[in-house]
Amino acid sequence: MNMKPALALSGVLLLASCTQPTLPAPKPTEPAPTPPAASSCPASTGPLTAIPAVQGSGDASPLLNQTVTVRGVVTADFQSGLRGFFIQDAQGDGNPATSDGVFVYTGTVPQKVQVGQLVQLTGTVKEFYGSTQIDTLTAFAGCTGTQAVKPVEVKAPFTGLEKYEGMRVTFPETLTVTNNYGYGRYGELGLSAGGRLFNPTNGNEATTPEQNAARTITLDDGNSAQNPAELPYLSAQGTRRTGDTVQGLTGVLHYANNVFKVEPTAAPQFTDTNPRPAAPQDVGGTLKVAGANVLNYFTTFGPNDRGANSAYEFGRQKAKVVSALRGLDADVVTLMEVQNNGDTALNDLVTSLNAAYGTETYRAVQTGTIGTDAIKVAVIYKPARVTPVGAYQLDTDAVHSRPPLAQTFSDNAGGGVFTVVANHFKSKGSCPSSGDIDTGEGCWNELRTEQARALLGFVDRLKAQSGDSDVLLMGDFNAYGAEKPIQTIEAGGFVSENKRIPAGERYSYQFGGQFGYLDHALASTSLDAQVSGVTEWHINADEPTLADYNVEYKANPECRTNVCTSPDLWQDSPFRASDHDPVLVGLNLTRDEARFTLNVTGESAAVVGQPYRLNIAASGPLSRLTVDWGDRVDTLDPAATSAEHTFAAAGSSPVTVTAISVDGQTQTARLTVTVTAPDVTEPAPQPGSAGLVISQVYGGGGNSGATYTHDFIEIFNAGRASVNLGDYSVQYASASGTSWAVTPLNSFDLAPGQYYLVQQAKGAGGTQPLPTPDASGTLAMSGSAGQVALVQGTAKITAPTEASVVDYVPFSGLSSTSSASRLGRGCVDTGSADDFTRGSVEPRNTASPLNVCP
């Protein structure tokens, strides 16, 4: 507190009179006040100082550390709780800037006083943490007679209260309990004029932190002891909820703990305006989805564990959580703050919940450990009401503090499909000293906004995979309704279902005496039309913390703290099961999902060693296409309309084609091919170079995104006789060039069905070398287009039409991840460009398995 400016002492000395001065004449329009009874005080050994002079007009007394003798009427005796009493100059000095009352600290030497008694005392003026008081009394005398002091009316805004410090005050307005966080610890309640206070960034009303502060006053219990054994102001339900109201509050205004507090001189008259709701409001619909924070549901009680500290506390916690979940009775529930110990804690909760129902009502989506945080999100559901569609999905983007968990469900009754995502964004606590600091929406707000953007990308993938645009985002986003993370999600195509709730009820969390909703239900625009209702069940945020499962400081046999005096308000009920209120949404689902189709055809029979062809048709563009032939898996160009394979052994071979659309949906097609052995006939003689072909060309080696570090040209013997390559070369020219570069081949007898790998120039990228090359050159081939020729001889050609050219392959449209490959794994040779397909890079050398052509 700032020190008040020093005041001159002239005018503050009074004669030592034994009789109080008479009251001033009343105004003609007011009834005459009852004059006080005659009072007499002993003569003072020194001058009397008026109480307003002790207070002064500033924050601190101008008479600090001076000894004064004052006279005043006792307005409240709190020596048993605050170790002092209040006195007030009944007449005052007529200056509205100076207080007429003061606190007299008696400490361990209490004085015998009565309210209304005139007293005279001598002591030292002190400032105790900003509170002006007189202590270290050296003289005290009770005067004869009594006198009533009329309280001054105080209305919001509650600013400039210094002028009332120590005075008797009354509040004509109805005040609302808006803060009960310190109720159990200090016996005090935060009150507000004009209803409960909402966080300025919640979107309920236009307000500022300063305006909220000006509406707030604290009701104390006249006791400075912590964890008081006698807790005032309890309702008949054994609680005192925020939202309840008090009328006609009267007391003295005291400054302590950096706030002005009303120490009541008459019992406050409370009204249970906000009684405990026995059940959530009806949300309608054929399905219900809930989001519930279970406040660190941990099944272990080690020194680094959160949640309950013992099995006893855990039993109390479990009872409340189970009661809350039964009250919600939702078909799908997203859970926040479950211990991330595999699925142990989650399964414990589901087992306990089913035991309360008396049957297996719920199942959990089994995910194991998610991420690295001590807590995770989870999903449970009623199998009688919904069925999971596909596997759960996690958003593993590193930006998330706790990875979001998604599961698609179908309605067992109507068949509608929707996807629910459980979320728990970065908290507003543990603020950094720089960077993502609090600029009005709590610290880490930029991180939460980045998490919101990542979540939108995750949702796009979920929609694609499910073929359904109905997505419901649930959970603790640690962002109030009008803050940037939520605005980002809304701008991404989601509707805040919480905004359907009336503004005065739109909250799920209390912090610092202000309310807002951190727990959200955000529906995609398509799902919003299917929402029948939403509510926040106010079983937690309105309750004092003293009602939770913890036993610290409570008069409970299991309490292990140094003080165990507070009343134990725990009840086997859902109230204060957590610090967040659960959210409940009703849905009337419709069948609106749409999926792409995949059609695969092929012969039911194939011959060993002969090419087999599949025809592939998808209803939309693909991002990935693979074929599992039973003996190998090929990754095809997503635009491919066919695939070929040569089976190496006879038998029944299952073939599976998997396609992923560009929007993330997955479809599979399966067929079974019966493979038989070929008829064996003696081959006819062939010329030496007959069947020698270029089977694969790759120029993207070492480029950005490439797997392999080198370019290569692959030769294949598609004929029926071995060919020695000692007098052959491969030659390369650019796509439009006429200048050819030569790489001679080594002397090697290439057997029928055998491959030969010619390594070329190395690039700067790539992650792995080629298989051992059979020949090497330094040709820097284009990664997209060019010309290659297999030449009998090593002389540089001038055109691909020369007689020495055994095979010529122009290529284009390639990339760092694709090569031009001859169909039939090298066996197809019609002299047409259709002999080649663009596909995954698969270099083969002389050590690769033979592929003898039929």
Image (spheres, helix red, strand yellow):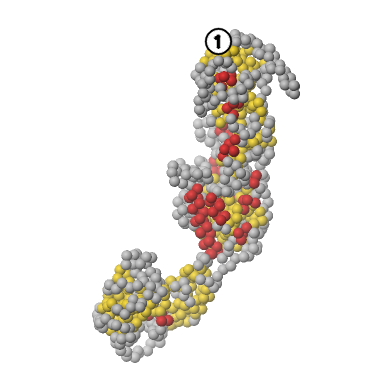
Instruction: Give the residue at x 54% y 34%.
Output: 553
> Would you place residue 452 above or below residue 603 in this image?
above
Q: Is residue 94 visible?
A: yes
Please tell me whether mark 1 sits on a helix, a strand or a loop. Answer: loop
Residue lying at the far bottom of the rendered structure:
684
Mark 1: give few (<14), some (14-19) or many (20+) Cα within 10 Å: few
Which amino acid type is shown beneath numbered disc 1? Gly
Residue 164 x, y percent position in the rendering: 60, 26
- Residue 716: image quadrant is bottom left
Residue 418 x, y percent position in the rendering: 59, 60
Instruction: Give the residue at x 51% y 21%.
Output: 6
Instruction: Give the residue at x 29% y 73%.
Output: 779
Q: Is residue 350 visible?
A: no
Work out whether residue 570 or residue 394 is closer to the camera in this orientation and state it: 394
Work out whether residue 562 or residue 642 is closer to the camera in this orientation and state it: 642
- Residue 179: image quadrant is top right
Work out whether residue 495 or residue 339 is closer to the camera in this orientation and state it: 495
Residue receiving disc 1: 46
Residue 681 x, y percent position in the rendering: 37, 89
- Residue 828: image quadrant is bottom left
> Would you place residue 23 above or below residue 769 in this image?
above
Work out whether residue 813 or residue 341 is closer to the camera in this orientation and state it: 813
Location of the C terminus by quadrant is: bottom left
Seen in the image, is 740 located left or right of residue 71? left
Instruction: Give the residue at x 41% y 81%.
Output: 833
> Would you place residue 650 above or below residue 80 in this image?
below
Residue 619 x, y percent position in the rendering: 54, 73
